[in-house]
Image (cartoon, helix red, strand yellow):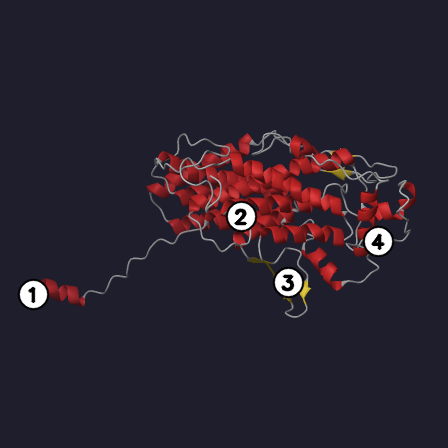
C-alpha cells in the first residue's frame, strides 16, 4: 500500500454534496400577502390591489429574465418591461426580491416580518452571482411596479354620504374612490357596470324580496344556511373575498413551473383588482338599500306584492356596510373562478378549502374544511351565501357573478399572452 492510498483510507469522509433547496416564490409570497392583509385589516378592494401588485411584480421579474435568455415563449409584461433584465439572473431570487419590494412599500409597518421572509428565502438559494443578479433585478422591478401604481385612483379614501328615501342605502360608506381606479388589465370598467336592480314596483323585485325575506331571516333557524354564510362571510381581519381566490389557486393540485405559476397569479390578481372597479362604481351609482331596510320599509316601495316586517333581521347579524347592488363577494368569485377555469382550461378541478371565517365543525372541533368539485361550484356557493345571509337579493348575486366573469374573460383574452405555443395550460382556445 503506497503512502497516498494510506492517507485516503485514513482521511475522514467528506459530507455528500447537497442540492440547494428551491423556494416556491408564488406560494410563499402570496401566503405572506394574505397574512399582511389580515394584519392590516385591509378592505376587499385594497386587498385585491395588493394581490395584483405583488403578483405583477413577481411575474415581471421572472418574465424579464426569461425574455433576456431568449425564451420564445416569454410573455408580454404586466407593468414593467424586461429591459435591463440579467440573462444569468436567478428567477427565484428575482421573484422574492420583487415581492418584498412591493409589499414593504405598500405596508411599511410590516417590513420586519417581510424582510425576515426575504432573508430566509435568499438564504436557501445561497450566495453567488446569479442569485445576486436576480435579487438586484427583482428589487428594481418591485420598485418600478409600486411606482407605476402611484396616483392610480385608489387613494385618498373617499366616502359617499348616507342616502335617504325608499330604495336608497341609508348609511355613509367609504372606499368609493375605487370606482375611478386605473385598471390593471381591462381597457375600461364602464362596460361591466351593472344594469341596476329591477324596478321596486316590478314582479321580479317582489320575487327576489320574497326569497330573501324567507331564507335570510335570522328568526328562522337553519344551521346549514347559517354555517355556509359564516364560511364565506370574510369580514375585516381576514384575507377578504379576493384572498380566498388566491387561496383556492394555491390549493389546486396542478404543479407548475415558476414562469407559469407567476403568470397564473398575475392574471388572477389583475382580474380581482379590476373587478373591484365596476363593483364599487355600480354600488355608487345605484345606491340600493339592503334587504333589512327593504323588508322593514316595504310599505314605501310602491310594490303591491311586498309587505313590511317591522322586526325583520338578516341572518348575517348585520345589515351590510355598503349598498346592496351589486354583491362584491359574487363579483370577486365570478372573476376568480373564470380566471382559474380559463387558465387550466377546465372548471371541474376539485379542491379543498378552509376559509378565514370558517365556523368550527362540531364533528372535528376544527374549522370547517369543505371540498368543491370545481371553481364555478365554489363561486356559486359563495355568491348564494350572501342571499342566505340576508345581505343581498338574488339579482345582485347573479349580476355580480356575471360581472366578474366578464372582467376575467377580457384579461385572459388580451393580457400576458404567450408569444409562442398555447395560451393556457390545456386544450383551450389559443
Residue at x-position 84% and y-position 59% = 219
Q: Quadrant of residue 103?
A: top right
Tag 4: Cα neighbours inside 10 Å, few (<14), some, or many (≥20)? many
Q: Which residue is mark 3?
A: 367
Q: Which residue is mark 1?
A: 2
Q: Kindly state the secondary structure of the residue where label 4 is placed.
A: loop
User: Which marked residue is nearer to the observer: mark 1 or mark 2?
Assistant: 2
User: Which marked residue is nearer to the observer: mark 4 or mark 3?
Assistant: 4
* Residue farthest front in this picture: 203
**Marks 1 & 2, CB-CB < 8 Å contact:** no
Q: Quadrant of residue 147?
A: top right
Q: Which of 269 and 37 lies nearest the eye of the viewer?
A: 269
Q: Kindly state the secondary structure of the residue where label 1 is placed.
A: loop
Tag 2: Cα neighbours inside 10 Å, few (<14), some, or many (≥20)? many
Q: Which residue is mark 2?
A: 30
User: Which marked residue is nearer to the observer: mark 4 or mark 1?
Assistant: 4
User: Which marked residue is nearer to the observer: mark 2 or mark 4?
Assistant: 4
**Marks 2 & 4, CB-CB < 8 Å contact:** no
Q: Which residue is mark 4?
A: 313
- In 3D space, how far apart are the residues under numbered discs 4 and 1 (Cα atoms)? 94 Å
Where does residue 75 sit, x and y in percent of width and height? Answer: 44, 36
Among numbered discs 1 and 2, the one appearing first in the sequence = 1
- In 3D space, how far apart are the residues under numbered discs 3 and 2 (Cα atoms)? 21 Å
- In 3D space, how far apart are the residues under numbered discs 3 and 1 (Cα atoms)? 69 Å
Among numbered discs 4 and 3, the one appearing first in the sequence = 4
Tag 1: Cα neighbours inside 10 Å, few (<14), some, or many (≥20)? few
- Residue 86 is tagged as none
Amino acid at each position: 500500500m503506497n503512502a497516498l492510498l494510506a492517507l485516503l483510507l485514513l482521511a475522514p469522509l467528506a459530507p455528500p454534496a447537497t442540492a440547494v433547496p428551491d423556494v416556491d416564490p408564488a406560494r410563499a409570497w402570496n401566503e405572506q400577502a394574505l397574512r399582511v392583509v389580515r394584519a392590516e385589516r385591509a378592505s376587499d378592494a385594497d386587498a385585491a390591489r395588493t394581490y395584483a401588485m405583488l403578483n405583477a411584480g413577481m411575474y415581471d421579474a421572472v418574465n424579464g429574465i426569461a425574455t433576456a435568455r431568449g425564451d420564445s415563449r416569454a410573455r408580454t409584461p404586466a407593468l414593467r418591461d424586461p429591459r435591463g433584465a440579467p440573462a444569468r439572473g436567478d428567477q427565484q431570487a428575482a421573484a422574492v426580491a420583487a415581492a418584498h419590494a412591493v409589499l414593504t412599500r405598500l405596508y411599511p409597518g410590516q417590513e420586519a416580518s417581510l424582510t425576515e421572509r426575504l432573508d430566509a428565502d435568499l438564504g436557501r438559494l445561497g450566495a453567488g452571482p446569479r442569485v445576486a443578479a436576480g435579487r438586484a433585478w427583482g428589487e428594481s422591478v418591485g420598485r418600478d411596479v409600486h411606482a407605476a401604481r402611484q396616483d392610480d385612483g385608489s387613494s385618498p379614501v373617499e366616502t359617499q354620504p348616507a342616502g335617504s328615501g325608499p330604495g336608497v342605502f341609508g348609511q355613509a360608506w367609504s372606499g368609493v374612490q375605487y370606482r375611478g381606479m386605473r385598471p390593471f388589465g381591462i381597457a375600461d370598467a364602464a362596460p361591466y357596470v351593472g344594469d341596476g336592480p329591477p324596478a321596486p314596483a316590478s314582479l321580479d323585485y317582489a320575487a327576489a324580496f320574497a326569497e330573501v325575506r324567507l331564507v335570510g331571516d335570522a328568526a328562522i333557524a337553519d344551521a346549514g344556511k347559517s354555517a355556509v354564510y359564516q364560511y364565506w362571510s370574510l369580514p375585516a381581519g381576514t384575507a377578504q373575498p379576493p384572498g380566498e381566490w388566491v387561496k383556492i389557486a394555491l390549493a389546486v393540485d396542478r404543479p407548475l413551473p415558476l414562469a407559469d405559476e407567476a403568470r397564473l397569479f398575475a392574471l388572477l390578481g389583475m382580474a380581482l383588482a379590476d373587478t373591484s372597479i365596476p363593483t364599487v362604481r355600480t354600488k355608487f351609482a345605484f345606491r340600493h338599500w339592503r334587504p333589512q331596510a327593504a323588508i322593514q320599509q316595504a310599505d314605501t316601495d310602491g310594490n303591491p306584492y311586498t309587505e313590511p316586517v317591522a322586526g325583520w333581521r338578516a341572518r348575517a347579524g348585520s345589515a351590510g356596510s355598503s349598498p346592496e347592488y351589486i354583491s362584491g363577494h359574487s363579483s370577486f368569485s365570478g372573476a376568480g373562478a373564470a380566471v382559474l377555469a380559463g387558465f387550466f382550461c377546465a372548471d371541474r378541478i376539485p379542491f379543498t378549502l378552509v376559509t378565514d371565517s370558517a365556523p368550527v365543525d362540531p364533528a372535528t372541533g376544527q374549522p370547517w374544511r369543505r371540498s368543491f368539485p370545481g371553481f364555478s361550484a365554489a363561486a356559486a356557493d359563495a355568491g348564494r351565501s350572501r342571499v342566505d345571509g340576508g345581505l343581498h337579493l338574488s339579482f345582485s348575486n347573479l349580476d355580480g357573478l356575471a360581472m366578474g366573469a366578464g372582467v376575467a374573460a377580457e384579461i385572459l383574452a388580451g393580457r400576458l399572452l404567450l408569444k409562442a405555443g398555447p395560451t393556457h395550460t390545456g386544450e383551450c382556445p389559443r
